[in-house]
Image: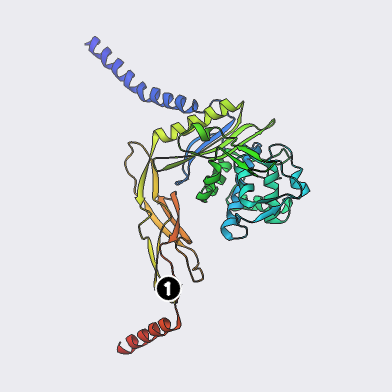
Amino acid sequence: MKKLMGLCLTFCLVFSLFPMSMTMAEERENSEIVNSAKSAILMEKNSGMTLYDKDSNKKLPPASMTKVMTLLLIMEELEKGGIKLDETVRISEHAASMGGSQIFLEAGEEMTVEDLLKGIAVASGNDASVAMAERIAGSEKDFVAQMNKKAKDLGLKNTQFKNPTGLPAEGHYSTAHDMAVMARELLLHDEVTKYTKIYDDYLRKGQENEFWLVNTNKLIKSYPGMDGLKTGYTSEAKYCLTASAQRNDMHMIAVVMGAENPKKRNADVTSLLDYGFGQYEGVKLYSKDDTMKSMKMTRGNPLHLDLSPEKDVVVLKKKNDKKSDYTTEIKVSKKSDLPLEKGTHMGWVIVKNGEEEVAKVRLETNNEVDRAGFPALWQRSWKNLTSFQRF
């Protein structure tokens, strides 16, 4: 009997300790994902979910990761039509004087917006960043004010910019969390990855001052699905990287700050991304071909406008977890003036799990709508009038 009770007691102790040991193992495994960086975060872009966090609200110098915000303002200006890819920008003496990483612009030189964009996205050109800042805002100072306003609009409370380059400056700081939010906003402009995933290219090709661009993010070449975004280094900031990779309906954003060297920085980013892709999966709720909303355009031809997601709407869940109950909200912006082209941004598809936003995808026009001519408008008015009279 004593042997039996002893066996039962041992059995109970083993199983009472088992969950604790599993939790400790999970915590240990989680803590070993990032070994070198002072601060890190893993966020899934479509859902905005944070999958891993290591002191992600710690204020640190972001170095050239600052250019994530610089690129965001450039992409927004392109979308608004304030600048065009093929327009030329005249380089000022101030822009040409920038030190650090550069594409060796000369004062008075002219370069297209697209080539300057490449110079920033691929080679981290400080001179190209200031040139674009001056083109968009008129001066570097005014562009920095726009950067800080955008940070405030995004709800970033631990970020302050002093320049568009990331060159050392007192009071210039951000956090891994804030960098991930900026990266998520930047990646809403899908076309930016056309530039951030370039491994090498040339500027001024065929000219005497031809310049070979080589991406400062070497994982572009070695990590499957990597499409950006921005490295950073100063002696104070150490080695930093805001990385982006797509795989299996998921788009991961990994940020590390303050790693000891490039090898350890890349190892931490690789470990974060491997964890995300290995532990989570995407669930498609809506196809990009689904009509989410139809709108009546009283002065349009045709009369109806269909709105569809820009791309498939995918939510994230941990593998083997039961499917959650999701609610979908359609937010339509103010109606744009006619005519409307197919693919015009008209709002958002927002998916929530409870109160938590788990996916946000642009809502776009699925068909063109022109202005209806007078005969069509008169015919509609007459039809409405006769219908009312019959009633």
Looking at the rendering, in which quadrant would you find the C terminus?
A: bottom left
Q: Residues within 10 Å of mark 1 (few under 14, many from 20)?
A: some
The structure's colour scheme is: rainbow
Residue linked to disc 1: 297
Image x and y of residue 302, in percent: 39, 73
Q: Amino acid at mark 1?
A: Met
Q: Report helix, strand or loop for mark 1.
A: loop
230 vs 13: above or below: below
Image x and y of residue 51, in percent: 46, 37
Looking at the rendered structure, the number of numbered marks drawn on it comes to 1
142 vs 320: above or below: below
318 on left or right of 231: left
Is residue 161 at least partly visible in the picture?
A: no
Residue 196 picture quarter: top right
Give the farthest residue toward the left.
Answer: 1
Image x and y of residue 77, in percent: 61, 56
**Identity of the residue drawn at 30% across and 89% down:** 390
Residue 195 picture quarter: top right
318 vs 91: above or below: above
